Amino acid sequence: MARRALQRRRRSQLLNHLIAYFGVMVIVVPINAYTTPEEPWFLIPVVVWGAPLALHVAWVMELFGKRRG
């Protein structure tokens, strides 16, 4: 039972992280396209925030298990 609650809480936290990420990107990309379309600086926040987001996904999927052996 406690394991299911933990999984539910992790999924909820990931959903919040995804909503924040995509919400910010929806704002940042058009600002970049409007202000300086010749310089794709929007890629910096996409990658810098996307990497921890990918780690968060892996954590929720429990890919960081205990080592055996």
Image (cartoon, grey):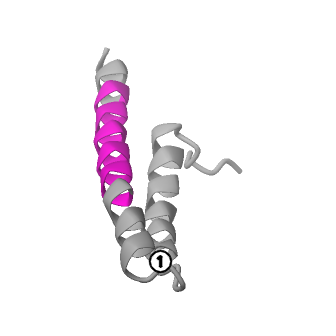
Residue 67 rendering spot, x and y as whole percentages: 62, 51
Residue 17 rendering spot, x and y as whole percentages: 32, 48
Residue 7 vertical placement versus 65 (above, below): above
Residue at the (42%, 65%) spot, across then down: 29
Residue 34 rendering spot, x and y as whole percentages: 38, 72
**Image check: 69 left or right of 59?**
right
Residue 6 vertical placement versus 57 (above, below): above
Residue at the (52%, 85%) spot, across then down: 39
Judge whether residue 61 is colored magenta.
Answer: no
| Total numbered labels | 1
Toward the viewer: 17 or 64?
17
Residue that mark 1 sits on: 44
Most common secondary structure along the magenta stretch: helix
Toward the viewer: 63 or 67?
63
Residue at the (36%, 19%) spot, across then down: 4
Toward the viewer: 63 or 36?
36
Mark 1 surroundings within 10 Å by alpha-carbon count, few (fewer than 14), some (14 through 19), many (20 or more)? few
Give the farthest residue toward the front.
34
Toward the viewer: 21 or 8?
21
Give the farthest residue toward the right.
69
Q: Quadrant of the N terminus?
A: top left
Residue at the (51%, 70%) spot, across then down: 47
Query: Which residues make up the magenta segment?
Result: 7-25
Judge whether residue 24 is colored magenta.
Answer: yes
Hey, what amino acid is under mark 1? Answer: Ile
